[in-house]
Amino acid sequence: MDECQVGPCVDGRCENVPGSYRCLCRHGYRLSGNKCTDINECRLAPCTNGRCENTPGEYRCVCRHGYRLQNDTCTDVDECEAGGACPGQQCVNTEGSFSCVSCQHGYHTVNGVCSDVDECVVVGVCGQDRECVNTVGSFRCECRHGYRASNLGRQCRGVFSDPHPTSAACSCVHCVCVCVCVCDQTLMSVWRQVCVLGESV
């Protein structure tokens, strides 16, 4: 006799065995008597950082805004990674979100990150008699080699360190002053700026 013909298994499959039958349940169900009932997988809390929703025969994890599902775990989405989230500002990723932060003076955004501005790439930022030195978030102007600051640091003038100059001839070309030491016959000129004992030049 085939007991399965009368359909004794509710929500399951009946399998005829010698002298009897047995009910087989699908994945996600358990047998209770002759009835297959849904297993509530959410009771085992399978979803990390997310909400579990039980569905017939299975479950699904639902993530909050700002998170993505990876293997039953909701992980933070780094909105700053792709770029473009904060035009003209620095993007700072936070758990489940992000914020836009204005760059400090002396910085600008490069791919969503505040980076130092190299002010020295601007030609003439320090004038012709000084050199530009870039610093973090700013810059400074220093006198070129052979010059020192004068007039409250606004101008650079030639430095004469020779102890025995007989005269100095200075000429200005395109607003750049070049000072040359003219040494007497008992002294030697070094780079035309310093007179030292030696051969005359």
Image (cartoon, rainbow, N blue to C red):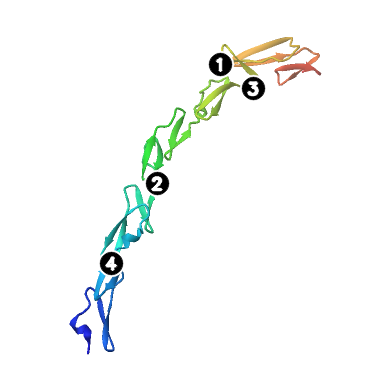
Q: Amino acid at mark 4?
A: Gly
User: Alpha-carbon distance for marks 1 and 4?
Assistant: 87 Å
- Per the image, the residue denoted by label 3 is 145
Q: Residue at x 40, y 39 (%)?
A: 91
Q: Position of residue 20 (x, y in %)?
A: 26, 86
Secondary structure under tag 3 reads loop
Q: CA distance from mark 3 to mark 2?
A: 49 Å
Q: Nearer the viewer, mark 3 or mark 2?
A: 2
The percent position of residue 9, horizontal first and vertical second, equals 22, 77
Residue under numbered circle 1: 175
Point out which mark residue 185 bears.
none
Dot in front, 2 or 1: 2
Question: Which is in the foreground here, disc 1 or disc 4?
Answer: 4
Sooner in the amino-acid sequence: mark 2 or mark 1: 2
Q: Amino acid at mark 2?
A: Asp
197 vs 70, left or right, is right
- Check residue 78 in the rendering and tell me which mark sits there, or answer none: 2
Q: Do the residues bearing badges 1 and 3 touch, measured as CB atoms within 8 Å?
A: no
Q: Earlier in the sequence, mark 3 or mark 2?
A: 2
Q: Please state, as top left, top right, bottom left or bottom right, where the C terminus lies in the image.
A: top right
Amino acid type of the residue tagged 1 in the rendering: Cys
The image position of residue 67, as x and y in percent, is 35, 49
Seen in the image, is 113 located left or right of residue 198? left
Residue nearer the viewer, 126 or 113: 113
The residue beneath circle 4 is 57
**Which comes sooner in the sequence, label 1 or label 3?**
3
